[in-house]
Amino acid sequence: MPAIKLIIYFLSAILIGSFAVQNMTSVEINYYDFRLNLHTLELPLVTVVMIPLGLGLLGAWCMWLSSWVKMRMVIRKQSKTISSMEEELEKLKNTPQLPAQVESSTDS
């Protein structure tokens, strides 16, 4: 399985490298700063494509990380509950029990 992952990573790297080489033409990006002044920036097309892709991947990773941390907290809480219940069960097993009381029934 690790060999398949390695092959997929190499193929992905080759595809990204090919994309970068083919899209080195410059494009103009118009944007506003905080004072609402219009600015123009000239960047390679691959940069214009890869920056939003990277930001999207980073955002998705942050969302996954937050859900993973929440899951770990729930698991830790449940593990503590399980261990306390197991301890209580052991205590209950070791306590002496009263003799069973037999109910006397009267036939009428």
Image (cartoon, grey):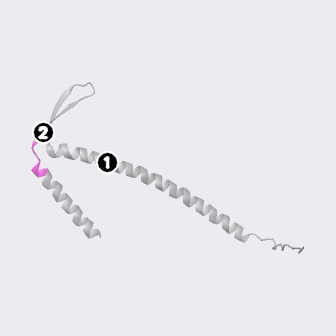
Q: Nearer the viewer, residue 103 or 24?
A: 103
Q: Residue at x 47, y 55 (%)?
A: 71
| Whole-percent x, y for residue 95 in the image | 75, 69
Magenta residue check for 96? no
Secondary structure beneath label 1: helix
| Whole-percent x, y for residue 70 in the image | 47, 52
- Quadrant position of residue 26: top left
| Whole-percent x, y for residue 100 in the image | 81, 73
Residue at the disc numbered 1: 58
Q: Residue at x 55, y 56 (%)?
A: 77
What's under tag 2, amino acid-wise?
Val
Secondary structure beneath label 2: strand
Residue at the disc numbered 2: 27
Q: Is residue 76 above or below residue 104?
A: above
What's under tag 1, amino acid-wise?
Leu
Left or right: 104 in relation to 33 = right
Magenta region: 20-25
Q: Earlier in the sequence, mark 1 or mark 2?
A: 2
Quarter in which the C terminus is drawn? bottom right
Left or right: 43 in relation to 32 = left
